[in-house]
Image: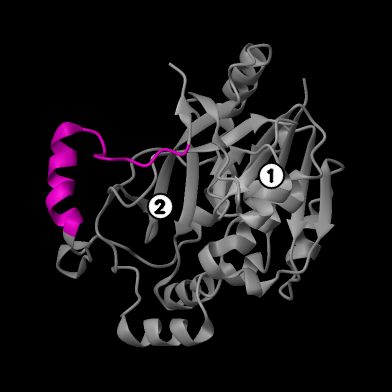
Amino acid sequence: MKLAGFTYVRNGFDYGVPFLESIQSVLPICDEMIVAVGDSNDGTREAIVDLNSPKIKIIDTVWNMELREGGKVFAQQANIALDQVKADWCLHIQSDEVFHENDLELIQAQIELHHEDKRVDGFILPFVHFWGGYDHIRNTRRVHNFEIRIFRNHIGVRSYRDSQGFRKYQSFEAYENGTEKGEKLRVKKLDATVYHYTGIRSPDAYAKKVAMFQSYYTSPEALEKKLASHDFHMHSVDRTIPFNGTHPKIMHAKVAAQDWEYSYKKELSVWHKKDKYLQPIEDFLGFKLGEYKNYHLIK
């Protein structure tokens, strides 16, 4: 039984994502690591080469910005990397996600345990979403609690929507032209947390990051209008709470290098109108109402 990791990245340094730490966090359990490296001009490709790992295979790509709507370019890049995977199982990790070293043995054990059980297509993993600084996480109904990050190879899986999830397809041609919606994967829960660091930026870098990221979802004209009508800063969030856990060792240097302070400012919080009413109810009940699940959970 073999496991391969796959990911994609473009201008990782400019975006301020821990793409090197991301790749390194899963290398110990992967037989190979496929990295689709987009046309970067900030040294991203060179830095990955400098990791000097025989497990890493780089696929050079050019991002098609015509695939802007809905973040389709992310799905395209994920599929390019996925197509190079030959192993029995696939582990997808995005460039702002890191796995904890304490969970790697569990991941291996669960894949081996369910390898012969063909009912199981893959696994969903829990997420913690960091925001503002390394000591705060966002914990509202606007963030996903679980996502598929591990699945079997050779069962017709493609990246779904903006690569946040995955589905099975009978025809890749139908997937490409949008005539097949795909089948949700049958998954088990795997208690190995994905550390999601996308919301961590210095105050000066945050607005730049938002603008760059949004450029993959909307046209330049629409983005200019959006930026003009909002005050993008790290406090433009619904709610964060202190993080009391431990970070993966591979992230310790970045955590120690944080040179700004973040604290949740309730008076600056930004809530969707519906969430103001639903969030207190969900906090009381302990689960998300009407949660979207792009998978079938096997008990």
Q: Is residue 42 above or below residue 118?
A: below
Q: Is residue 241 magenta?
A: no
In the rendered image, which quarter is residue 265 located in? bottom left
- Find the distance from the CA under tag 2 to the CA under tag 1: 19 Å
Neighbor class of circle 2 (other Cα within 10 Å; few <14, some 14-19, many 20+) is many
Of residues 230 and 249, the one nearer the viewer is 230
Q: What colouring does the structure picture have?
A: one colour
Are the residues tagged 2 and 1 within 8 Å (C-beta)? Answer: no
Q: Which residue is mark 2?
A: 130
Q: Single out the residue that lies furthest toward the right.
A: 54
Q: Earlier in the sequence, mark 2 or mark 1?
A: 1
The amino acid beneath tag 1 is: Gln
Res 145 label: none
In the rendered image, which quarter is residue 204 located in? bottom left
User: Is label 2 in a helix, a strand or a loop?
Assistant: strand
Query: Quadrant where the N terminus lies?
Result: top right
Of residues 14 and 171, the one nearer the viewer is 171
Q: Is residue 58 above or below residue 25?
A: below
Q: Which residue is mark 1?
A: 24
Q: Is residue 284 magenta?
A: yes
Tally the numbered discs.
2
Q: Position of residue 230 (x, y in %)?
A: 31, 80
Q: Which residues are magenta?
A: 274-294
At x 71%, y 39%, the residue is 5
Query: Quadrant where the C terminus lies?
Result: top left
User: Is label 1 in a helix, a strand or a loop?
Assistant: helix
Q: Position of residue 227 (x, y in %)?
A: 39, 83
Q: Is residue 104 above or below residue 234?
A: above
The amino acid beneath tag 2 is: Phe
Q: Position of residue 59 (x, y in %)?
A: 82, 56
